[in-house]
Image (cartoon, rainbow, N blue to C red):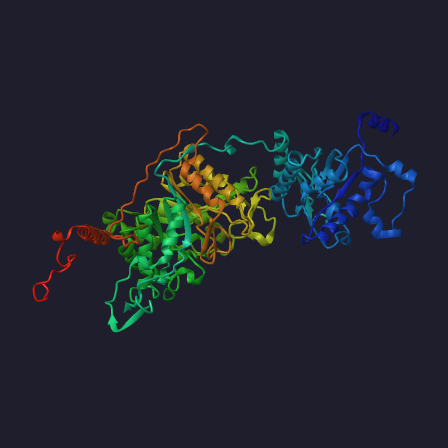
């Protein structure tokens, strides 16, 4: 023993004591709660740290609170204890850090896993000692085996927090150690949780160690010495082509059909001499007047705001139940239809292309007319085709960019409903292709909701297969029949058959006839995608209540990702991966990102998160276009305004008929003006704007005939004024007798 101790003394140069701690945050941001948090840290960590690192005595809060229950140090003892550590050894996240903290020491505040804040507090409180993290981890379920993606995420989060503390806060952290090497007995929790980098089967005889995915991750982390920036993470420079579609999306128009003027059919006389008021003429009634777009004052405001954004396209959905309440032509809301017609024609006048979806799911009756029931019924297919043809006839002269169905895979569709929905889409596409395309010269397709999913563990084959499964069930389910084979993905059908063979009741996936396959396959002109975020997916059943037993997957979120107030992850690189996957699956199809956006805090002056989101997502789209040769034709931001949407996705704030542009709107407009991200010194891109023809538009602007009439009246007024002025200045002998000459009298006093 003496030889060993002598050897250790010669090798070890630094000595300290390892202290465990939690981190705590105020339940509410009040002065008293903040003081209670300080007290909690002093009771748990300061109890030992302050005597060693500051003055040899306990924190004052402990002395005041505990009084005589707390022993006292003599002056000699204080001097002896003070400074007896060469560095600050910290244990954070191990069992003792949190689970054995006495509830009384929490002081009714809330514990969190914020290692960065704890490191900053220690550095500030104890005069910046070198900090060595000697134990750090969190736990996962005991049923987790080798693919521990949740444990890996915790590790990534803690190491990332440590790096931020070093780089941004100036905290002198000199080392980091993961707890623990292998799974074992975890004190109060026994074998019910796991923390190891190596998996141990406790039921086996040999207790063989198997390296987990988290161990592989830590191995790579050490080799990279952190998280170095990858080449593909660097922002790209370049521009999109001049015909790139820059758009904005609104789910449904905020329709206001109140007619603002010319509504009174009565005739009035203006009493200019006495009352100065209009006097109604009894029995005087003007002829009934046809409605005009100028009657809808609300349209002018919306169009002017859209023009201010410098966008080229505006996307919204029609409300089928509002246009045809009974689902057929027996009842038509002509006022609403005329409003839509006015709106799209005015968009064209503003040189903005309308992108119109015929149907979008909503909460009430799936967004369908009430008499139809749902998509499970065949008559809904026929009714949708009739409704689409009616819209093509009424709006097709103005709308050249149609979406049959917007984000149908966002609704909780049964397989039977989706089957009919695909047939309805194909039926409408062929209807447009045969009867309207030649004269209206438009294009039509379908739009899918498409978030990216990434394997939670990059080293796990099971997680990779789980990600493929989710993509096929979420996107391929409806995309494969249209854009590739005319039938559902093979993986989807095989998986459902596999689950049935295991005794798991899987829903029946219908079959298409050969005729239906032929009808559906190729029923597109482009592929429209709504993309908002990215998720992780694992095959491990780490949290049973969040596990999808049908697909045998669990969706996760990387805790290091930036998140919105509604906890939506901001993951720009997911968009580029999605676009490449679509290209790989469905070939060189023209793609539009028809909606992409993020919620942000409502009451802040600058929506910086949304500005970050827009810039980085568009940059990833640019990489896909320039570097990966993805056939990307447009990018639309969701959404236009916060009106009617409590989630605050809009680029405009709305309050009592007032719209206010957010900083993100100006930021998006600047990107549009630059056509993306030209590098420094790049010549400005000159894109001539193509003005859109609008045949037979009903417009808020004066018609040519009205302009001609006004010009004629103005001309007549000028001529008349000139004649009167000219002759009033002429001599009497040249006067016009009636206009200006004094009449001469004849003999006898009679007038000439």
Q: Position of residue 209 (x, y in %)?
A: 67, 37
Q: Position of residue 265 (x, y in %)?
A: 28, 68
Q: Which residue reaches farthest left?
A: 747
Between residue 708 and residue 148, name the one nearer to us: 708
Question: Relative to residue 77, is residue 65 depicted above or below?
Answer: below
Residue 265 in sight: no
Residue 190 in sight: yes
Q: For the image shown, how many numbered marks are present on the structure?
A: 0
Q: Position of residue 707 (x, y in %)?
A: 24, 52
Q: Quadrant of the N terminus?
A: top right
Between residue 442 and residue 552, name the one nearer to us: 442
Taking the image as shown, residue 118 lies to the left or right of residue 704, namely: right
Q: Quadrant of the C terminus?
A: bottom left
Q: Which residue reaches farthest front?
A: 748
Q: Position of residue 280 (x, y in %)?
A: 29, 71
Question: Relative to residue 720, is residue 247 depicted above or below?
Answer: above
Residue 330, picture quadrant: bottom left
| Residue beneath the point at 13% across and 55% down | 736
Between residue 698 and residue 519, name the one nearer to us: 698
Q: Which residue reaches farthest bottom?
A: 282
């Amino acid at each position: 023993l003496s030889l060993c101790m002598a050897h250790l003394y010669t090798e070890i140069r630094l000595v300290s004591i390892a202290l465990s701690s939690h981190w705590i945050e105020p339940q509410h941001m009040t002065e008293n709660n903040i003081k209670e948090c300080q007290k909690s840290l002093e009771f748990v960590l300061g109890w030992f740290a302050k005597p060693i690192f500051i003055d040899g005595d306990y924190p004052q809060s402990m002395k005041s609170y505990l009084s005589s229950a707390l022993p006292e140090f003599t002056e000699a003892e204080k001097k002896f204890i003070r400074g007896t550590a060469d560095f600050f050894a910290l244990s954070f996240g191990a069992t003792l850090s949190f689970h054995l903290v006495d509830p009384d020491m929490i002081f009714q505040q809330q514990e969190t896993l914020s290692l960065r804040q704890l490191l900053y507090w220690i550095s500030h409180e104890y005069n910046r000692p070198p900090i060595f993290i000697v134990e750090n981890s969190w736990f996962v379920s005991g049923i987790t085996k080798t693919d521990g993606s949740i444990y890996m995420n915790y590790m990534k989060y803690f190491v990332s927090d440590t790096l931020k503390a070093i780089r941004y806060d100036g905290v002198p952290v000199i080392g980091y150690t993961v707890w623990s090497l292998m799974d074992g007995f975890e004190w109060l929790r026994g074998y019910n949780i796991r923390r190891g980098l190596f998996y141990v089967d406790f039921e086996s005889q040999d207790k063989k160690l198997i390296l987990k995915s988290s161990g592989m991750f830590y191995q790579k982390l050490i080799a990279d010495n952190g998280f170095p920036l990858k080449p593909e993470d660097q922002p790209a420079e370049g521009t999109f082509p001049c015909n790139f579609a820059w758009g904005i999306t609104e789910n449904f128009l905020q329709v206001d059909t109140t007619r603002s003027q010319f509504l009174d059919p009565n005739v009035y006389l203006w009493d200019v001499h006495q009352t100065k008021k209009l006097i109604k003429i009894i029995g005087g009634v003007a002829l009934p007047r046809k409605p005009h777009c100028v009657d809808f004052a609300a349209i002018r405001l919306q169009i002017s705001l859209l023009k201010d954004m410098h966008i080229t396209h505006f996307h919204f959905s029609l409300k089928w139940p509002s246009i045809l309440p009974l689902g057929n032509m027996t009842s038509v809301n002509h006022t609403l239809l005329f409003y839509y017609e006015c709106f799209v024609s005015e968009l064209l006048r503003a040189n903005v292309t309308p992108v119109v979806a015929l149907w979008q799911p909503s909460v009430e009756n799936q967004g369908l007319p009430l008499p139809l029931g749902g998509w499970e019924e065949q008559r809904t297919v026929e009714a949708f085709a009739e409704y689409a043809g009616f819209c093509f006839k009424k709006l097709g002269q103005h709308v050249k960019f149609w979406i049959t169905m917007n984000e149908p895979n966002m609704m909780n569709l049964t397989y039977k409903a989706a089957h009919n929905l695909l047939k309805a889409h194909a039926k409408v596409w062929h209807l447009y292709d045969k009867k309207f395309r030649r004269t209206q010269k438009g294009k039509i397709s379908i739009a899918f909701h498409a978030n990216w999913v990434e394997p939670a563990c990059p080293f796990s084959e099971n997680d990779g297969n789980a990600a493929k499964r989710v993509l096929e069930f979420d996107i391929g389910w409806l995309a494969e029949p249209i854009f590739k084979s005319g039938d559902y993905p093979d993986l989807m059908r095989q998986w459902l058959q596999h689950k049935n063979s295991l005794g798991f009741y899987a829903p029946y996936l219908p079959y298409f006839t050969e005729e239906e396959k032929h009808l559906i396959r190729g029923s597109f002109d482009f592929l429209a995608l709504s993309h908002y975020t990215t998720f992780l997916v694992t095959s491990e059943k780490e949290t049973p209540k969040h596990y999808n037993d049908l697909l045998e997957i669990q969706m996760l979120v990387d805790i290091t990702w930036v998140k919105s107030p509604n906890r939506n992850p901001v993951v720009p690189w997911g968009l580029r991966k999605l676009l490449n996957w679509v290209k790989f699956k469905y070939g060189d199809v023209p793609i539009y990102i028809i909606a992409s956006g993020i919620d942000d805090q409502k009451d802040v002056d600058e929506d910086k998160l949304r500005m970050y989101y827009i810039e980085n997502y568009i940059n990833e789209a640019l990489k896909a276009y320039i570097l990966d040769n993805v056939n990307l034709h447009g990018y639309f931001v969701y959404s236009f305004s916060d009106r009617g949407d409590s989630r605050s996705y809009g680029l405009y704030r709305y309050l009592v008929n007032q719209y206010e542009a957010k900083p993100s709107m100006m930021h998006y407009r600047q990107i549009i003006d630059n056509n993306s991200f030209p590098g420094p010194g790049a010549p400005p891109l000159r894109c001539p704007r193509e003005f859109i023809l609008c045949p037979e538009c009903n417009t808020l602007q004066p018609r040519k005939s009205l302009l001609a009439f006004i010009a004629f009246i103005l001309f007549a007024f000028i001529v008349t004024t000139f004649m009167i002025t000219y002759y009033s200045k002429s001599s009497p002998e040249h006067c016009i007798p009636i206009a200006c000459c004094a009449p001469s009298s004849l003999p006898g006093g009679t007038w000439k």
